[in-house]
Amino acid sequence: MEVIGTRTPLIDAVEKVTGRAQFTDDLHLPRPLFIRILRSPYASAKILSLDLTLAKKASGVRAIVTGSDFEKTFGVLPISKDEPAMARDQVRYVGEPVVAIAAESDREAFEALSLVRVDYEVTQESLSFEESMKERPDRIHPELGKSNNLHKSVEQKFGDLGKGFSESDVVVEGSFEFPSVTHGFTEPHATQVRVESHGDITVFSATQVPHYLHRAISEVLEIPMHRIRVVKPFLGGGFGGKSDPFPHEMIAAKVALRTGRNTKITFERVEVFFSHHGRHPSRIKMKLGVNRDSGIRALDGHMMIDGGAYGSFGVVTTYYNGVLLQGPYQIPNFSFHCDRYYTNKPMCGAMRGHGGVNPRFASEVLLDEAFTQLKLDPCEERLRLFHEPNSKTPNEFRITSVGIRQGLIHAMEASKWKEKYQKLPYGKGIGVACGFFISGSALPIHWNQMPQSTVRLTIDYDGGVTLYSGASDIGQGSDTMLAQMAAQVLGVPISQVKVFSADTRLCPIDYGSYSSRVTFMAGNAARNAAISMRRVLIQAACELAEIPEPPVEEMEESQGDLSYFRQGGRSPRYGDPYLGPNPNYEQDGFKFSEGKIVTPRGDRLDLLKVIHRALDGRGALQTQGVYISPQMGGSFKGAGAGLSPAYSYSAFISEVSVDPKTGFVKVDRVTVAHDCGKVLNPLAVEGQLEGSIHMGLGQVLMEEIRYEDGAVQNGSFLEYKIPSAFEMPEVVIVPCPSDESEGPFGAKEVGEGALAPFNPSVANAIYDAVGIRIHSLPITPEKVLDAIRSQKGGGR
Amino acid sequence: MNQRDQMVTMVVNGYEVTRSVEPSTTLLEFLREELGLTGTKKGCDLGECGCCTVLVGGKPALSCLTLALEMQHQEITTIEGLAHGENLHPVQKAFVEEGALQCGYCTPAMILNGVHLLNENPTPTAEEIKECVSGTLCRCTGYVKIEKAVARAAKESSVRAK
């Protein structure tokens, strides 16, 4: 009975289809105070005075908090803790929290907002790159000591760019513009706080990062972490948009601590747009040189990204804009420069494909232009350019498994590429693009030597297995993935495995669900915990069968500490060399399957009897497993950015219809190959790919947040248009055989990497259809019509 | 009880309920807060996302745009009213097995729309299924597996009916 590789429905699917799944706003705590937030109407202003007199007297009002209640600022990255829980003397974007009112009912809280008087003095705002680049006395973050609104500047150079371009048969250049897009998860942000004995608090919140939230609340509220418990209930979509600690979480906790009352806050949809943290709008200039025989010789990228008012993940985004271009192809001479500017707009942060999406559009469109000029087939050529397995990039990314070559070949066959490329009638087109992404960051956000993920596993008297993991299931199915690990190793049905996750009181630390790290890191930790439990059960099985216990191979330092079994029996530390791929834990000759343990001698022992034997004299059966990345990477500044224990690869072939009369683009069919290593759960992998296409489709054809004087103009689902079922193309997923030796059962990431290359595959297909290149997203009918009309001599 | 409150009686998931409500109370608020039926979700409160869909007299309605008082003597079905004990409705079962849900937030609405479609039209075309699904926003799945699940439920129901 194989669990791995089997189409496995989510273990919590029945809760979700019956309405039993409780999301944060669904929890009914006794007598909560309802919190509403008064937000800044100005992009940039000084707060001269706050008059709360009338609001304090209003019906039902029990507490009011403002910026003066919070001393400490916070931020998900320790290097940019620049965000206050509430504006103090100054507001920096339209929608920034200024006053929070807690009342006995939501309506009373809402009505009391109108009784607050705030005197603002409007100051010169900075809304564009041009304004933020200028030297100016009124900076958004004067504490940085810079003369303008630059937040972070990153530059890296490898090889010899001049030589690379001179070796190229064709050099293409382009400028690209990408507007603001947002996650668009359906569940608005929500937080509830329950007051416990001794004044402790439990924070229930829609968060991808319970551990970081735990830290941030402790710091901002200045109470120790042990007095705070963070729990993530069911979560209605994240995509990076719930991967920061948020002001409303601090506010809800603050009010609970102050009043001793439970608290509740749920955003209106427009507040989700104010809060944002979406993809950085960017402006990219890129130059690419290609030699017809030796492939890409040089790439030079200049990016500007618009960070909005605060830091969020922005420093990482600044790096990712460049470093993620180091794949999927070999590029010997490589350089990028990326500047992140603060502006007086809602802040940008991590969004699916973090930092890599817009540069990928630029590079893949330019590559298409280069192959067009060289009159070479863009699929055939790409086949020659991919990374070699077990190689190193110029910026010293350690490349392990690469399965995309075969994947692209499958995609070419399934899409009938050869019969269609440059052969379809005018208005129909086909295009290709490829991508590359991390399976989690090899380095933690907070520098330490703790494992990046720890999973605890217990096994009960009746064989029930329970996993405890800090990983946050945000709908991607991480709980199901963890259960698969234990079920596979211990040979029990998945229904026998229960998962407690994302609860900081019950679960060991895991950094959370971002950077596509969970399957690789928490998955490995769960697998290791199960392997350790397997080892305990083998000892008991040997006692029962009266056979000698097999030796644990390479068991060196931590005898008896089986949690580190995977890594050669040693406790891994940063600085340790690579300890080799995941060992095959079945080398000992024992088989765990369908509730039985079969010894190498052929005894068939009932798993339950073995469990009972193991409990004798030992008591509760509990193990833990950890994951920590091996040491890797260069020693230059910024070498850690983009380092990952394994990388995913993807290839998209998109087919479009372009109506030359209206400019309307319809994506008809998408063929995708994604190298996520071994497929653990085809149902989940397909779901991630289909979802990535949906989100990419929105960005490439229709989505854009429009700002006017810094204020969101389309902060609703009616005006911020997300694709419906009608816009979705037919999706064809082809196999991409691959096996990642360090991944849990051979797996790598699938949640994010597939979004980025989809977008340029559509743009390249539009070129094949009507011969136009659009370098700014979204590719609206207006832009298409304009481009068709201005074609000179026209055609492809 | 507020002076302006009015009594309303409706049948929710087969049971008659009578409550006094403020006239401005939406059906969504009534279900979630008064009856504790939190399976019906609030995504936008403006009738744009479709997550709050319930069946009123068997037809889909956006509960965030419907006043509770309008529901006098109406029959309401929410997601909690579909399964019989542990026996899932065929549409629910198809959603589980096809992987037609990820985060689960739009799922109740998607399922109720599917139930309505199959009640009205047991053998829908692919286009009719697409239309049924298109009324609700899903940001996770790309709708592909949702359409497959509705088609599967239709197929399995028609097999059973024969």
Image: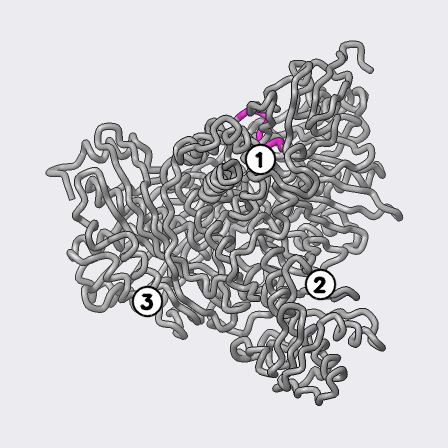
Q: Is residue A221 left or right of residue B71?
A: right
Q: Residue at x 51, y 47 (%)?
A: B98
**Circle nearer the viewer, 3 or 2:** 2
Range of the magenta residues?
B41-47
Q: Which mark is residue A272?
A: 1
Residue that label 2 marks: A465
Dot 3 amino acid type: Gln
Q: Is residue A195 above or below residue A43?
A: below
Image coords of residue A187 (percent x, y): 60, 38
Chain letter of disc 3? A
Residue occupying the far left of the picture: A793
Question: Marks 2 and 1, how far apart in space?
Answer: 38 Å
Image quarter where the C terminus of chain A lies is: top left
Q: Residue at x 33, y 48 (%)?
A: A760
Where disc 3 sits, the SS reads: loop
**Circle nearer the viewer, 2 or 1:** 2
Q: Residue at x 63, y 68 (%)?
A: A594
Dot 1 amino acid type: Val
Q: Which mark is residue B65?
A: none
Chain letter of disc 1? A
Residue that label 3 marks: A330
Q: Is residue A625 above or below residue A89?
A: below
Question: Marks 3 and 2, how far apart in space?
Answer: 45 Å
In the depicted view, which residue is nearer to us: B64 or A141? B64
Is residue A711 shown to the viewer in this render?
no
Counting residues from the start of the chain, the first of labels 1 and 3 encountered is 1
Where disc 1 sits, the SS reads: helix
Dot 2 amino acid type: Val
